[in-house]
Image: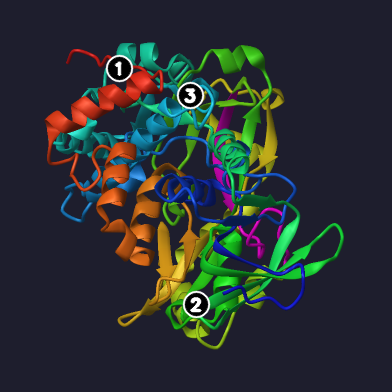
């Protein structure tokens, strides 16, 4: 039954809030599984993927855990924990399977417009760090997902892998690196816009830009979504059976507006970012890799320094950073009041507790904000000894809002990662958090659907379609090397990626 209050109100099956990679992924998956559903998408900006999914706003790498050292923390006894890296690597393979399905089904344009091969490297210096990287390499070799990884402490070998990084480096310095030639660069902004373009072509899908969701209220078994057209000022209601809040840093305020008890106690800690962007084409052409190092003590995980080659708007770009900072905005285009307005009686204690437990992070962010251009160049020269000030300019990156949640032991903890918060009845879900969200979007949405649509996920028709879209659905790639290699080869061919690996 349609429940409306005026002629402009309507009832739909699904409302997606936010036009980023998460909403795009969920929207396409649901329309493939249930073509007849009605979907409305609301984005407060005038274009899709303008916040966290944009290539300039950090989400443009293809996090696969090949090179990100923060995914393999070192334990007090010197051993290396690889559980998170294995999980992320497998999730990225799941994403590639889904993207291959999109390409084969002609749901997106040519894959080279959003993904391409590029080596992923980890680079460290100093005896202790070299020992850590060697241990990491040895442990990861036991997992088929990292088959093909190379390790070297030979300066001559490293000069072949990354000539700019090794040029004019102190020959007495102890250095080491790993390389995965199967690494990729993903432009999530481009991919997101392709998926939304396809969604808009389908029946029973409407997309609205410059529309902001002002209220969320459950009423008579439906969600009343109050939206405002920012251009005309018109307000209207949309009633939905299911709502997904995929608004990046803006998800927390909307979750709070929903009033669901599952959202109580959640807070957000915003971290801003900046890049040094290379402006010298000659320098850009000399580097062709993603080179990640170790984060400074107290640094948030998304601030792991890296010298990053990307393709943005059809052009090769070279970035270094990100340099972390602090802003009370939850979105790059947000308000300075975002953080204070998010503090509620149900989350103030977890936020205070998490803040007290993370004083080193606060100190780190203050120091980052106080950095001069010379300070940033000094950090860059640790990775690029020949860097010249005139070849680099500062570029503002996106906002990340880290999750703060209740914790019995500490009162509140700061989580680095993503968190799906859903109502007990499965009628609404929100995605909170940051890295490595975009690269693992498909796995995250599979988890969301199993929570919110269990009665549909168990249907034979859905199971068959999910297996068609994601051949490893329900299986473990890390436990089945043969399946992993077979599917990796298939997805590499479909996405026009490198397939050969070095002979070790």
Dot 1 crowding, Cα within 10 Å, few <14, some 14–19, many 20+: some
- Does residue 25 show up magenta in the picture? no
Q: Residue at x 30, y 57 (%)?
A: 457
Marks 1/3: CA–CA distance: 15 Å
The residue labelled by disc 2 is 351
Residue behind mark 3: 111
| Separation (CA) of disc 2 from disc 3 | 42 Å
Earlier in the chain: of badge 1 and badge 3, it is 3
> Which residue lies at the image location 34% right of the left edge and 22% below the top edge?
492
Q: Are marks 2 and 1 in contact (CB under 8 Å)?
A: no
Where does the magenta region start and end? 317-336
Q: Please identify the quadrant where the N terminus is shown.
A: bottom right
Can the viewer see residue 181 in this picture? no
Give the label on residue 499, or none.
Answer: 1
Query: Who's the residue at 66% across and 77% down the image?
Result: 341
Instruction: Provide residue 234's location: percent of width, then percent of height.
Output: 83, 66
Mark toward the viewer: 1 or 3: 3
Magenta segment includes 334: yes
Can you give x and y, in whole percent of width and height, for residue 42 in the image? Answer: 66, 57
Between 329 and 123, the one lying in front of the other is 329
Q: Earlier in the sequence, mark 2 or mark 3?
A: 3
Q: Quadrant of residue 294?
A: top left
């Amino acid at each position: 039954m349609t429940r409306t209050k005026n002629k402009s109100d309507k009832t739909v099956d699904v409302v997606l809030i936010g036009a980023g990679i998460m909403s795009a992924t969920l929207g396409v998956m649901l329309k493939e599984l249930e073509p007849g559903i009605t979907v409305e998408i609301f984005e407060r900006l005038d274009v899709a993927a303008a916040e966290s999914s944009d290539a300039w706003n950090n989400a443009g790498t293809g996090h696969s855990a090949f090179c990100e050292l923060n995914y393999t923390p070192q334990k007090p006894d010197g051993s290396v924990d690889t559980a998170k890296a294995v999980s992320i690597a497998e999730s990225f393979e799941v994403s590639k399977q889904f993207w291959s399905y999109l390409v084969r089904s002609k749901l997106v344009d040519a894959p080279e417009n959003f993904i391409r091969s590029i080596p992923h490297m980890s680079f460290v210096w100093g005896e202790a760090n070299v020992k850590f990287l060697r241990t990491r390499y040895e442990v990861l070799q036991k997992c088929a997902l990292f088959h093909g990884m190379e390790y070297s402490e030979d300066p001559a070998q490293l000069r072949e892998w990354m000539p700019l990084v090794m040029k004019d480096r102190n020959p007495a310095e102890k250095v080491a690196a790993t390389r995965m030639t199967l690494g990729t660069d993903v432009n999530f902004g481009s991919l997101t816009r392709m998926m939304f373009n396809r969604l808009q072509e389908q029946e029973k899908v409407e997309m609205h830009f410059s529309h902001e969701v002002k209220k969320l209220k459950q009423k008579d078994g439906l969600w009343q979504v109050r939206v405002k057209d920012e251009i005309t000022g018109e307000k209207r209601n949309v009633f939905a059976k299911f709502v997904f809040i995929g608004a990046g840093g803006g998800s927390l305020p909307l979750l709070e507006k929903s009033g669901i008890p599952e959202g109580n106690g959640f807070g957000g800690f915003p971290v801003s970012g900046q890049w040094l962007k290379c402006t010298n084409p000659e320098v850009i052409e000399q580097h062709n890799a993603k080179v990640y190092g170790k984060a400074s003590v107290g640094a948030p995980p998304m601030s792991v320094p890296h010298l990053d080659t990307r393709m943005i708007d059809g052009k090769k770009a070279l970035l270094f950073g990100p340099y972390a900072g602090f802003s009370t905005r939850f979105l790059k285009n947000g308000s300075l009041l975002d953080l204070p307005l998010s503090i509620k009686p149900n989350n103030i204690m977890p936020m205070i507790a998490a803040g007290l437990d993370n004083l080193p992070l606060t100190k780190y962010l203050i120091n980052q904000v106080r950095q001069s251009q010379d300070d940033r160049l000094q950090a860059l020269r640790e990775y690029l000894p020949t860097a010249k000030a005139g070849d680099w300019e500062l570029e503002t990156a996106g906002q990340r809002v880290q999750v703060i949640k209740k914790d019995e032991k500490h009162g509140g903890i700061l989580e680095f990662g993503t968190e799906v918060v859903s109502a007990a009845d499965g009628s609404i879900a929100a995605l909170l958090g940051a890295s490595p969200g975009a690269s693992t979007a498909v796995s995250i949405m599979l988890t969301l659907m199993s929570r919110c649509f269990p009665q549909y996920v168990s249907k034979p028709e859905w199971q068959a379609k999910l297996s068609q879209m994601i051949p490893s659905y329900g299986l473990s790639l890390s436990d089945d090397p043969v399946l992993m290699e077979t599917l990796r080869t298939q997805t590499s061919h479909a996405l026009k990626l490198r397939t050969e690996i070095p002979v070790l």
